[in-house]
Image: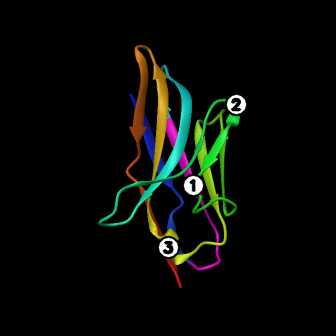
Amino acid sequence: QVHVVESGGGLVQAGGSLRLSCAASGSRFSIVAMGWYRQVPGKEREFVASIGDSDSTRYADSVRGRVTISRDNAKNTLYLQMNSLKPEDTAVYYCYCNARETYGVNSYWGQGTQVTVSS
């Protein structure tokens, strides 16, 4: 079992920055990939960014150039540096971790952290 906890959300003005963190903890697992999704009420959860093997990264078109995803492998912690924030970035941001455990790869999600960007 892997426990995923996000932090770092909050209220920021348009044009500002936030850094989200996501810590994965547990026993006998290794991380295959981690990433971020976001969701606003009434809409489907949408992909934001991910980082996988060899630190390969992917970004949604809506955030590319404004967001940087990174990972501290020693701490099993994921980061999302968000700059030039826009009101449309307002959402609950969810972190996921694809973890390789004894019997295969499983996906774990955090509870989410609210990001609110005021205009």
**Dot 1 surroundings within 10 Å: few (below 14), some, or many (20 or more)?**
some
Instruction: Nearest to the eye among marks 3 and 1: give it.
Output: 1
**Dot 3 surroundings within 10 Å: few (below 14), some, or many (20 or more)?**
few
The answer to whether the residues at label 3 and label 2 have Cβ atoms under 8 Å apart is no
Q: Which badge, 2 or 1, comes first in the chain's sequence?
A: 2
Q: Which residue is mark 1?
A: 60
Cα separation, mark 2 vs mark 1, equals 19 Å
Q: Which quadrant of the structure image shows residue 65? A: bottom right
- The single residue placed furthest to the bottom in the displayed view is 119
Which residue is rendered at x = 29% and y = 66% of the image?
42
Q: How many marks?
A: 3
SS label for mark 1: loop
Closer to us: 47 or 81? 47
The numbered dot on residue 88 is 3
Q: Locate the N terminus and report the quarter of the image it occupies.
A: top left
Q: Which residue is mark 2?
A: 54
SS label for mark 2: helix
Whether residue 92 is in magenta: the answer is no
Amino acid type shown at disc 3: Glu
The numbered dot on residue 39 is none
